[in-house]
Image: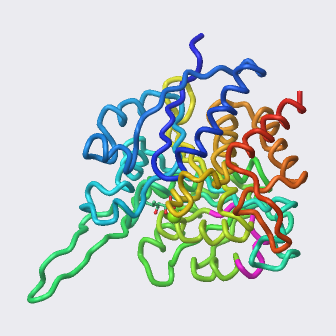
Amino acid sequence: MANPSLLILPGDGIGQEVMEQVKRVISWFGDKRGLAFDVSEDLVGGAAYDAHGTPLHDDTMAKALEVDAVLLGAVGGPKYDDLDFSVKPERGLLRLRKEMDLFSNLRPAQCFDALADFSSLKKDIVAGLDIMIVRELTSGVYFGEPRGIFEEGNERVGINTQRYTESEIARAARSAFELAMRRNKKLCSMEKANVMESGILWRDVVNEIAAEYPEVELSHMYADNGAMQLVRAPKQFDVIVTDNLFGDILSDCAAMLTGSLGMLPSASLGAPMANGRPKAMYEPVHGSAPDIAGQGKANPIACILSFAMALRYSFDKGDEAARLEAAIEKVLADGARTADLMGEEGGTPISTSEMGDVILAALDASL
Ligand code: IPM
Ligand code: MG
């Protein structure tokens, strides 16, 4: 049987250097665990714009639709700030999500024991935190029509539209219930049903889907209260399901609870392909961090953990994913720290590639 295929899109800024470490990890699993992948690489974001005048070439889009999984680094940078909206680096990312129809975005927020002191919240509020935000990713105000900046009378008006169909809500909700079943059977749905019709529909449909999962304890919360509860007592949550825009905001909020944005992966999943695997793209939650790009300072852990999510959700290798996650916990417990993880006590940070070295050594030690 042919090896599973991976398309690597490092993108911009630190995307390039963190992905170098992911490639080493992928090779390790090929060499040491007999998990060989056919890896190809292409451009996205500003890098694609520089080469082709578009943040995602049609050929790259076509490849993304063919492979078993896409691994993406990060897109964007100040160099591209003044570009026309239609060719901004972010448009490449949004096109991938939309055309691959990746409706379910899994964003774990997990607090590593070794890093609990780094949170802006008190240690006991975040220690042991392990929640999962399921963000609807292909609809809502990010894509709704009408949209644009129009003339109205003698002034301009900016318009975006929050729009959700029942089926769009239902499939996102179902993926969240499925996940809840594999975790602690607890799900909280967040919207603004007090002010938005789309929120009322969201709540209705989630309640309908709940009938298929009688074992899951379902609750509903207004998203503003959800944001407040996330910083007040985050451990009350297990799985959270929410729309595209609230999910964008709440997941950044949840990510920061854990102490470092440089640590968090994400998976964006769609419908199953002919081979039974879901269409999938994996990417770190952090951005391209232009301020430190090219200096070997970036933390590659979020991107490496995104590959662990690929092992689990695309390739059904939960045991190998757990091996990789354990290796990362081990190096953190042993004190390995990139610059973003330097606490008040100081010390000397290791570089991006040195973090890769110690993770590979911990993987070797796991055999
Ligand atoms: C994210 C980012 C993106 C989003 C941007 C880069 C388009 O903030 O993945 O959370 O808003 O979805
Ligand atoms: Mg965001």
Q: Is residue 321 above or below residue 77?
A: above
Residue 291 lies left or right of residue 337; in this view the side is: left
Q: How many marks?
A: 0
Image quadrant in which you'd find residue 108: bottom right
Residue 125 lies left or right of residue 91; in this view the side is: right
Residue depicted at x 43% and y 78%: 196
Residue depicted at x 60% and y 22%: 37
Image quadrant in which you'd find residue 153: bottom left
Residue depicted at x 67% and y 53%: 299
Q: Is residue 127 above or below residue 36?
A: below
Residue stretch rendered in magenta on the structure? 231-240
Comparing 118 with 264, the one in front is 118
Q: Is residue 223 above or below residue 275?
A: below
Q: How is the image coloured?
A: rainbow
Q: Residue furthest bottom?
A: 154
Q: Locate residue 174, reporting x and y percent.
A: 59, 51
Q: Residue furthest top?
A: 1
